[in-house]
Amino acid sequence: MPLLSVNNLSVSFHTRNGVTEAVKDVSFSLSKGETLGIVGESGSGKSVSCYSIMGLIPQPPGRIESGQAMLDNIDLLKCNEKTQLDIRGNKVAMIFQDPMTCLNPYIRVGEQLIEPLTYHKNVSRIVAKQRAIELLKEVGIRDPEANFDAWPHEFSGGMRQRVMIAMALIAEPELLIADEPTTALDVTIQKQILELVADIQKRRNIAVIFISHDLAVVKGLADRIMVMKSGEIVEEGETNTVFNNPQHEYTKKLIAAIPTGAKKASQVVDKSLVQVDNLVVEFTTDQGRFRAIDEVSFDVKKGEILGLVGESGSGKSTIGRSLLQLVSASGKATFDGISLLDKSAKEFLPLRRRMQMIFQDPYASLNPRMNVFDTLAEPLKVHGIASGEGLVEAVFALMDDVGLDRKFARKYPHEFSGGQRQRIAIGRAIATKPDFIVADEPVSALDVTIQKQILELIESLVKKHNLSMLFISHDLAVVRRICDRVIVLKHGVLVERGHVNEVWSSPQHQYTQSLLNATPDAIA
Amino acid sequence: MAISNFDETEVGQSLWQDAKQRLRKNKLAIFGLTVLLVIGLACLLAPWITPYGYEEQNLGLGATAPSWQHWMGTDNLGRDLLTRVLYGGRVSITVGLIATGVALLVGVTWGAIAGYIGGRTDAIMMRIVDIIYALPFMIFIVLLMVIFGRSLLLLFLAIGLVEWLTMARIVRGQVQSLKQLEFVEAARSMGLSQWTIIRRHIIPNAIGPVIVYTTLTIPNVMLLEAFLSFLGLGIQAPQSSWGLLISAGVETMEEYPWLLIFPGVTLSLVLFSLNFLGDGLRDALDVRASKD
Amino acid sequence: MGKFIFYRVLQAIPVLWIVVTITFFLVRFAPGGPFDAEKSVPPVVKAALEAQYNLDQPLISQYFSYMGDLLQGDLGPTFKYPGRSVNELIATGFPVTAELGLYAILVALVIGGIAGIVAALKPNSTQDYVSMSIAMIGICMPTFLLGPLLVLVFGIWLEWLPVSGWGDLPGDKILPSITLGAMYAAYVARLSRGGMMEVMSQDYIRTARAKGLPNYMVVLKHGLRGGILPVVSYLGPAFAGILSGSFVIETVFQIHGLGRFYVQAAFNRDYTLILGCTVFLAGLIILFNLLSDVVAAYLNPRLRSEVGSK
């Protein structure tokens, strides 16, 4: 008999702008000790279906239209509130995506941790504290006695997620629902958390529902996989079967979108376009001066995509920004033989036409009050490339280039999807026909199928316009797929450089090795 | 087939149009706007609306309750209250608008400069705001009005000088967060001049909160004027304002309550409408409620 | 935490100094002196009077001697109440004003806080609309209008409550306290609603719900701390507003508190009294701003430990 069985669940949201069907007639079940992976892109309904079971959908605007969710002969969707509270956090526990915001900043960690125990099991505080300290040790928090009284802000993201896991486990639930628990974390931390979840699942033999947009992450963890799209289940089966023999078109598309393999060696002229020597960037903070970039040297060759890899806080974005004088830096950097760092803003202006940037967040990188035409026309006008009748032609040509329908020229950013917005942003960057582009995590905010399209677009544009690119990313699989060479940055210091294939087959630095180890590989 | 003519492209809906639509659906805000327009126009057209003069006395008549001849009644000198409320409204509304204008001008300039330049300049400029903020202003204004007499100009200045501080904080916060957004960085990397960035990328995005806060400042200013006039420190007879009329009404409220109630209701109605409109604008422009 | 308070006190000192200095010179540069009104005063007597109050000294030395006295807590003699010092007058007026202000703050916090939280718990429900509409009326009904109207209705027409005085008749404290507190209750209601709404949409509230805590615990234990922060920060400015509001209340209800002294001193051009009251009130306001900042910082653990460790 399954532990949880969900039948014909439908959930919709009723807002001013009409009714959205978020989950349509979804059924699945889960046995004790089993791990079910639910995979889907944003808006697929994967989180909503689990939140509905937990009674965590705000009603209104949400409404559970139909269905039942049976756990121990209780229908979670129809039982009274008291029963529901009894189950939540007690028999079914959850962990969430962003550990930075999921702990209450106004209450000490320990107090939050023991709440499920003191509330559901009537355990005295002293016993609860003992139990909590044991658990903190189990999830890998050092010095649990002292950290019991810490505030959440004193913990890093990884540590907070460990606390969240301990909190979920403390009342010994039968089912753990994990909603993208590693998406907000760096790869090395992600690996630790995934191992921890797998370990706990085995040791306690509990059932786990693991929700993720990342097939590779789910693959290493789940016994079964359920693929969702637009509120419906499109495929379900044993993990290996789904991966090796996907039935539904969408599943095939998802699997094909996982960046795999290395870029084929391309025709790179062995001539540097950008040369950076001993680049140093310092920031002044309350604690004094802080070196974000410490004597970094590298070059970008003509026609090459150079990958710049690092985890959050490594300073990888700062390097890109300093080359475009968005951040001031010292050291030496040249572009096509022209020295960059000693130029005044005015002297730098002609160079801006030849060097451009693509940003990470397509929601923040476009001015919400300017339509596509104005956005794309701006660089053309600034550099006097086109005007009058020619301007319309040039903008249309750009839209063709990045695969945007011309009829959208007068639409505003908020009327587009994330992928389309990124196309607009790329169009803006290539408008002046630059030689060199800094792409700062251009695909990390996008769904995997969209990510694939944008990567292909970038590749084709690089080839078509003979661009050179500094491609900044935290995602090693993406870098391997698109870049010729790669440099690895850790805490502002360059620790590794080389051709992608060399680095992948024999990483020299220990940090690169740990990064590569931590990257979940869907294909292996 | 690809479109080659710009006019064939689909027209998008800008955020301003979005906001206009949302505002139109907000009944309270539209009610507020209507009330404001009606009262504003009535005050402006006062000489054509009432047949009585503002100082026109009718001692034989004395104080009378509202009637068909005198919709709001008359005071003990036989002056028509409606006329006095409309003329008083001119002063109150003017004070509200001009003092808010002063606050807007000073606050926006100060906040925008501090936010855009940042660094040490910003620190110094905002420290100055903090210090002035900590000054007990109401007491200062009372003092100023006492010492330098009750001139209208001084009143504008004094009130404007209190209200600019919050405006400066709001604008500075807006500009500072906008400045860090990627589209402004994109504009910089594109080589746009500082001024163009401010004009095309910063101002259009910072203007929403400014509009909202301006709408909410006007009632504050009118309240402050009325407060000072009530204490006898603001507008002086023979000039009139709603605050002064209320003050006069209080003295005779036992015998002639309408002399208190009508000016009071008018003032409250205007404050009400401005607040509703401000709240409506806030929702429509999707400005998050913020104190700083 | 101790250091935070120390720095805030350090910051308050220049502010207080600026207030004293500006007020001092403003008063001195004002046209007309305190003895101008009495036209019959012969020049000799006037000179003697001025000498008595040190008005014949150079301005700058007057300033320093005033500052010297101030540092010892002496606000000087009054001009218009012969034989009484400013300190004495403040000592008679302030307890009344303080009591009035305290009741008003209580009215504001209790009524406003409850209304705001009740509204936030069910946004866009009837209870939300009703309490926020009442709050809006409170904001749009200025003290000097609400006071007389309440007097008219409850004092004169219904004859339920006394219309003036403070502590003379039973129940005469009710109307002034409610009148003064009403507007601030409205602001507190709006702020606490906004704060609670903001907090209740945070991820950590979802975490608390996922633990199976009942609604009242989610609200009171996990929501309230963060939700009332805006109200706490607002208490400083509210206090300043209540003090100046008491000028009106004391006039309307004929209460002999500090506010009446201040307004009368302003009309009488009683310079030392204006100066003394301004310094005293400013000091109080600055103190309360400081207190509300400290409490707000205390409620925010991040600020508490960062500031504390520096």
Image: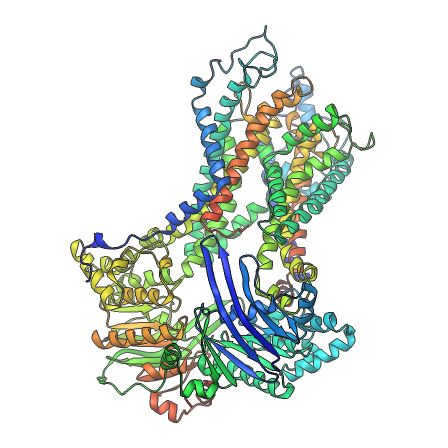
Q: How is the image coloured?
A: rainbow
Q: Residue furthest top?
A: B60
| In-image side of B44 versus A276 (left or right) | right
Q: Position of residue A55 (x, y in %)?
A: 60, 66
Q: Quadrant of residue C77?
A: top right
**Which of the two residues, C307 or C270, is positioned nearer the viewer here?**
C307
| In-image side of B104 versus C49 (left or right) | left
Residue at image location 46% in from the left, 29% down from the top = B38
Q: Quadrant of the C terminus of chain A?
A: bottom left
Q: Residue furthest left?
A: A389
Is residue A347 in view from this perspective? yes
Q: Position of residue A155 (x, y in %)?
A: 60, 74
Q: Quadrant of the N terminus of chain A?
A: bottom right
Answer above or below: position of C232 versus A478: above
Is residue B234 in view from this perspective? no
Q: Residue furthest bottom?
A: A506
Residue at image location 40% in from the left, 71% down from the top = A446
Q: Position of residue B126 (x, y in %)?
A: 50, 52
Q: Quadrant of residue C200?
A: bottom right
Answer above or below: position of A201 versus A318: below
**Which of the two residues, A194 or C174, is positioned nearer the viewer here?**
A194
Total number of numbered discs in the rendering: 0
Residue at image location 66% in from the left, 50% down from the top = C118
Q: Position of residue A151 (x, y in %)?
A: 65, 70
**Which of the two residues, A131 or B1, is positioned nearer the viewer here?**
B1
| In-image side of C262 versus A16 (left or right) | right
